Image (cartoon, rainbow, N blue to C red):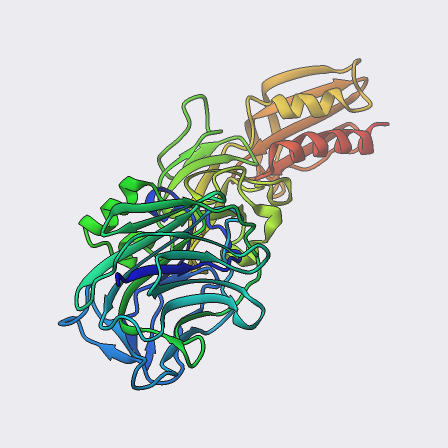
């Protein structure tokens, strides 16, 4: 009698990770390389979830594995051979799922050859793949139990890549990158988070053979993607992509003039500037005025757009308004696959005064307007606080009745002027942002007007 692949799929939920290309929707990718007595993960939705040796599956070296190291199960000798995820694994995709793995089966018949299951076995809420004596794909975890005949044999003593996709209406089975069968099955997928277990289910259900590069997506892979996985023997490291901290590039201060500014220090008069940039991996990003990591910045500093992608737009929020001529903006980005984050410092050359407009606005919102006369870039003789006579050019002189207001702003140096009360008042501002200049000028005039 022919042997076949039974894919028992008792369906639960996977948490979606927005990525691009083959790693779009990846939920877990277990390389099954070995380290410290465990079969390691490359990525899963928990982020700290290696796969523990529960009993005694055998770590195997690259000479017998498909990609790097792998894990061997010997169910006929030890029915309790198993691997389990350290934490409950969330699986997303209410009506979309893909499972892909390499298997080297050593036996047929005798029992249900369970490759893996995810869910609670005792209540039937289980999503699993088995090699069986029947040609069926089973969906359990709620009435009605559904299955269809795959009509596919599986080989022994030979590495094969198996892929199962489910789109909420149809199951498709792929062997070595080739679609071998498909069947209509209508089933609601459970969203219960649970441990992922390989091989052991019960004393009668386990696996006899090797498993390598076990992958789960919360979407249906395309035929081209599946063929690429097989043809190029893709490992988890390729499928997931780098899990290192993001690296930023192509940074453009888009609010720094009509053409933007791509060269640091970034010159702008905008005290809440905007930036566009790229990351080398799919990332979530935040922007602030302190050198903090991504979690510390908090959600109030989330970027405007681009989360989960490699292209981002961020605008500094009002809570972090820039105030000094030389100031700094910090972009903190976190890899969407894990907690690895990086923070990039951007130096800002802030033009704090734009042709005196903010001083004019301050005068025009004060109590001397509209009756005041205003002189621009006026040369005046003054004495400084050290009693030195100066001939200086100040930004504005406002005259109202018999009172004079001498107003100046500089990015770095004060003139050191003093008042001649109640006739002449001097406002010597340094290193203020545009909003502060207007407010300070208006308040200064109002406080000294007779």
Q: Position of residue 35 (x, y in %)?
A: 29, 77
Image quadrant in which you'd find residue 318: top right
Which quarter of the picture shows residue 279? top left
Quarter of the rendering occupied by the N terminus? bottom left
Number of numbered labels in the structure image: 0
Judge left or right: residue 105 versus residue 386.
left
The one nearer the camera, 185 or 215, is 185
Image location (x, y in percent) of residue 301 = 58, 46
Residue lying at the far front of the rendered structure: 1
Asked if one can make out residue 241 in the rendered structure from this viewpoint, the answer is no
Where does the C terminus fall, quadrant-wise?
A: top right
Image: 273 above or below 93: above
The one nearer the camera, 22 or 423, is: 22
Image coordinates of residue 83 in percent, x first then y, are: 38, 76
Q: Nearer the viewer, residue 124 or 363?
A: 124
Seen as rendered, the residue at the extreme right is 450
Q: Where 196 falls versus 241 (above or below)?
A: below
Q: Residue 143: in sight, yes or no?
A: yes
Residue at horizontal 54%, vertical 48%?
289
- The spot of residue 437 in percent (x, y) is 65, 32
Q: Residue at x 81, y 17 (%)?
A: 401
Report the side of 139 relative to 209 (left or right). right
């Amino acid at each position: 009698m022919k042997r076949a692949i039974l894919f028992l799929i008792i369906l639960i939920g996977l948490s979606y990770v927005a990525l691009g290309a083959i790693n779009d929707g990846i939920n877990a990718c277990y390389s099954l390389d070995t380290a410290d007595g465990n079969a390691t993960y490359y990525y899963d939705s928990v982020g700290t979830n290696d796969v523990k040796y529960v009993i005694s599956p055998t770590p195997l070296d690259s000479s017998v594995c498909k990609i790097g190291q792998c894990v061997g199960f010997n169910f006929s000798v030890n029915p309790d051979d198993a691997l389990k995820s350290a934490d409950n694994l969330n699986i997303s995709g209410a009506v979309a799922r893909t499972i892909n793995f390499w298997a080297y089966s050593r036996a047929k018949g005798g029992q249900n050859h369970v490759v893996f299951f995810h869910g609670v076995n005792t209540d039937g809420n289980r999503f699993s793949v088995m090699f069986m004596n029947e040609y069926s794909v089973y969906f359990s975890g709620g009435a009605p139990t559904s299955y269809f005949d795959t009509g596919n044999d599986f080989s022994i003593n030979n590495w094969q890549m198996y892929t199962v996709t489910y789109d909420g209406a149809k199951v498709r089975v792929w062997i070595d990158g080739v679609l071998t069968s498909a069947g209509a099955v209508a089933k609601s997928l459970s969203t219960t988070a649970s441990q992922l277990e390989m091989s052991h289910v019960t004393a009668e259900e386990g696996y006899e053979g090797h498993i390598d590069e076990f992958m789960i997506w919360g979407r249906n892979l395309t035929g081209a993607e599946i063929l690429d996985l097989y043809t190029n023997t893709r490992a988890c490291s390729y499928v997931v992509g780098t899990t290192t901290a993001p690296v930023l590039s192509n940074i453009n201060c888009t609010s720094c003039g009509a053409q933007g500014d791509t060269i640091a220090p970034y010159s702008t008069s905008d005290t809440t500037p905007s930036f566009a940039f790229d990351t080398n991996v799919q990332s979530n990003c935040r922007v602030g005025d302190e050198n903090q990591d991504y979690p510390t910045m908090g959600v109030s500093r989330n970027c405007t757009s681009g989360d989960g992608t490699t292209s981002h737009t961020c605008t500094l929020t009002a809570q972090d308004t820039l105030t000094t001529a030389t100031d700094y903006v910090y972009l903190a980005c976190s890899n969407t696959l894990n907690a690895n984050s990086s923070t990039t410092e951007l130096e800002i050359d802030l033009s704090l005064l734009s042709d005196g407009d903010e001083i004019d606005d301050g005068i025009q919102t004060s109590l001397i307007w509209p009756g005041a006369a205003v002189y621009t870039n006026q040369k005046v003789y003054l004495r400084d606080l050290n009693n030195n006579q100066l001939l200086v050019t100040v930004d504005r002189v406002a005259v109202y009745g018999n009172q004079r207001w001498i107003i100046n702003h500089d990015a770095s140096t004060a003139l050191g002027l003093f008042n001649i009360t109640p006739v002449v008042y001097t406002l010597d501002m340094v290193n203020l942002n545009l909003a502060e200049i207007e407010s300070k000028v208006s308040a200064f005039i109002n406080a000294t007007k007779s």
